[in-house]
Image: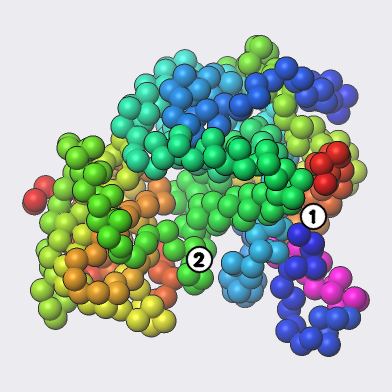
Amino acid sequence: MSKNDLPLDDNSPERDSNPIHQRSNEASNSQLVAGYVLGDLEPDELERVEMMVGDAGFADELARMERTASAVATALAHRNRYSMPNQLRDQIKRDASRFHQRSDDAIRSKQVVAPEREHSRDENQHRSVYRERLAWCVAVAACVLAMLAISVPRRDGSLQIAETQSLSLAEERTRWVQRFPSAVKADWTDGTTPMSVPVSGDVVWDGSSQSGFMRFVGLPVNDPAESQYQLWIVDPQRDDEPIDGGVFNSSSTDEIVIRINAKLNVIEPQAFAITIEKPGGVVVSTQERLPLLARVDAS
Amino acid sequence: MTEEVESSFATPSRDCETVSILQRVAAGDPVAMEHCVDRYGDLIWSLVNRFGPTRVDADDVTQDVFVQLWQQAHRFDPAIASETTFIAMIARRRCIDHQRREGRQPVIHHQWEGSPAEPTFESVEVLEQADDAAKAERCMEHLSEAQKQVLTLSIADGCSHRVIADHLAIPLGTVKSHARRALIQLRQCMGLQADADMSGGVV
């Protein structure tokens, strides 16, 4: 990965081939990435950053910059280190134990995958180091961007967490429900702006594993270029503002299953709401179009 | 300051585990989760406390950080960065998210929560492995005093650049310029070292 992979301001090939312009644009892009990590971007700068999201060069630069900021934070924290209170330490350990006991299938699957990955790395170490580094940078950048999503409007499809339906997801949900019999379950009902056609289904959520699924039958197919569905989790224990549960599409009015990936830790969900938003979703919904609502206590 | 940090950071542990704590966490090892809390708890608490204006906030964010660690542990790759850096990155992001959600700004020169940490075997080991932090400490010596001051308030204390501008009585544009250039400078300074370290004998 070279810094030359960073997207440039001007798409002109002639300009791109000019090394002076390249250096100037790289410096400009580094300024943007630095501002992004520091959280001081102006709206116009934020738009430029959005256009770079999904680019491998941007991901690499972002990962490096984020790593730098974290290293600085660690060094400065060392100057004034404090001990975590024992009560909190014990609480976190208890929570960790519960998290482990009720961890979802994804964690279990990693136990199977890990040895194969290690084996592969041993065989191709020299060739794969660069590729692994790139993959890690992209993964970290994706992770960082997902965490930053609360403040950055998402436009790029690569940042969508929720997934569209597949048979395997339906099967996965079935297994998940068996694994978490005490999970919260709520049926979809009409929201403030109901669909013109009947939509049924439910949402299931388990707090200990912070996982869950939505199921819909009859959800109108959307054009992702025009609008997308977005899940919101209402959790007064956590926050007055609903938690973003992910953006997703409907490609069929038959049964579809969507995995929930809440952006924040959900404590005690009271309701789940579906809104229709612009492509990529929004940070704060105006709730102008809220067709579906699932109240936990009403199910 | 630099010498002190170098002495505790500079020598990576030679007999550290071949499988990291986070890798064991990712594999579902419950004992590793406890070790993770013991080893990195003070670091996370220190990072969070600087951001969190209240004890309740700090408790909440710290618990969030550990939930994120359990969920994101599989993303960690020791070939790229140390566990400390990975964990600090997650902790910092959770702090920023929390601060934005609450719409709060930290108080500059606020009182720290908790008690000063006594160096323990675990915490010393964490620092020894925090190679990136040691590099950052060294590289920060090359920054101007103004850059150091702005970057500390921005990264460690989580202050917005507007708050920093008011606090230091300098223009907002100057604060932004100092902060961005300082971070880029550090990335370049650390990056050269990191590339040299990572390429040694492998690529």
The image shows residue A119 at horizontal and vertical percentages of: 61, 38
The kind of residue on which mark 1 rests is Ile
Q: Measuring 47% from the left and 57% from the top, which residue is drawn there?
A: A150
Circle 1/circle 2 CB separation < 8 Å: no
The image shows residue B122 at horizontal and vertical percentages of: 63, 16
Mark 2, residue position: A158
Task: Label 1, secondary structure: give it.
Answer: helix
* Camera-side residue of A261 and A168: A168
Q: Residues within 10 Å of mark 2 (few under 14, many from 20)?
A: few
Mark 1, residue position: B184
The kind of residue on which mark 2 rests is Ser
Predominant SS of the magenta segment: helix
Q: Residues within 10 Å of mark 1 (few under 14, many from 20)?
A: many
Res. A243 in view: no
Res. B9 in view: yes
Please identify the quarter of the rendering in which residue B173 is found.
bottom right
* Camera-side residue of A60 and A245: A60
* Camera-side residue of A299 and B182: A299
Q: Are marks 1 and 2 on the same chain?
A: no
Nearer the viewer's eye, disc 1 or disc 2? 2
Q: Measuring 49% from the left and 63% from the top, which residue is drawn there?
A: A159
- Give the extent of the magenta segment: A19-34
Q: Measuring 34% from the left and 39% from the top, which residue is drawn there?
A: A104
* Chain ID at mark 2: A
